């Protein structure tokens, strides 16, 4: 698995676990902790995948997913959230995300979803 990944997450435990899973793989990973840095990164760099924690958002995270989609419509987008309702998950999935994970996330499932997304590029 090869690729350039942007990890946008301010949950240290979650981010560190994901970084640990990706260690030793042929991945280039950039990590950001806030939305302004997320937006600057996706404007400046063409990533193969973005892992975005909705709790990073100060407003409606689904709107940020839409913004990311407009800037980078073809990027594989994996979304993480604490909101577990089926209705909310459906709204997120309608935005064309590759995978939606509810916290506490199954890190291996996120890794597999990332692997699938990168292999489909």
Image: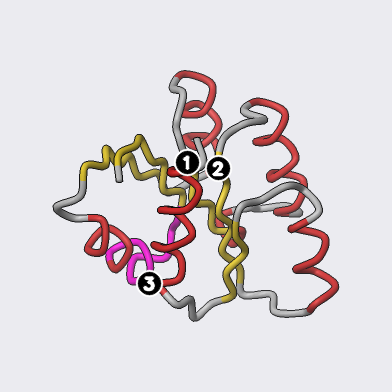
Residue 108, numbered label: 3
* Tag 1 residue: 49
**Are the residues flagged by discs 3 and 2 in contact, CB closer than 8 Å?**
no
> How many marks overall?
3
**In the image, what residue occupies the spot 62% across and 64% down?**
100
Question: Would you place residue 25 above or below residue 66 in this image?
Answer: below
Magenta span of residues:
9-16
Q: Is residue 94 left or right of residue 115?
A: right
Label 3, label 1: how many angstroms apart (C-alpha)?
16 Å
Other-residue count near label 1 (Cα within 10 Å), few / some / many at <14 / 14–19 / ≥20: many
Other-residue count near label 2 (Cα within 10 Å), few / some / many at <14 / 14–19 / ≥20: many
N-terminal of the pair, mark 3 or mark 1, is: 1
Find out whether residue 10 is within the magenta segment.
yes
Classify mark 2: helix, strand or loop.
Answer: strand
**In the image, what residue occupies the spot 66% across and 51% down?**
97
Classify mark 3: helix, strand or loop.
Answer: helix
Q: Position of residue 65 (x, y in %)?
A: 69, 45
Residue 76, numbered label: 2
Residue 80: name its quadrant. bottom right
């Amino acid at each position: 698995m090869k690729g350039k990944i942007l990890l946008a997450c301010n949950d240290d435990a979650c981010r560190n676990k994901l970084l640990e899973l990706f260690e030793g793989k042929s991945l280039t990973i950039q990590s950001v902790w806030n939305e302004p840095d997320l937006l600057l990164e996706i404007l400046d760099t063409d990533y193969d995948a973005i892992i975005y924690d909705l709790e990073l958002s100060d407003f409606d995270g689904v709107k940020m997913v839409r913004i990311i989609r407009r800037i980078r419509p073809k990027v594989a987008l994996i979304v993480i959230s604490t909101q577990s309702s089926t209705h909310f998950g459906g709204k997120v999935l309608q935005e064309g995300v590759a995978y939606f994970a509810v916290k506490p996330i199954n890190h291996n499932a996120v890794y597999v979803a990332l692997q699938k997304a990168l292999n489909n590029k």
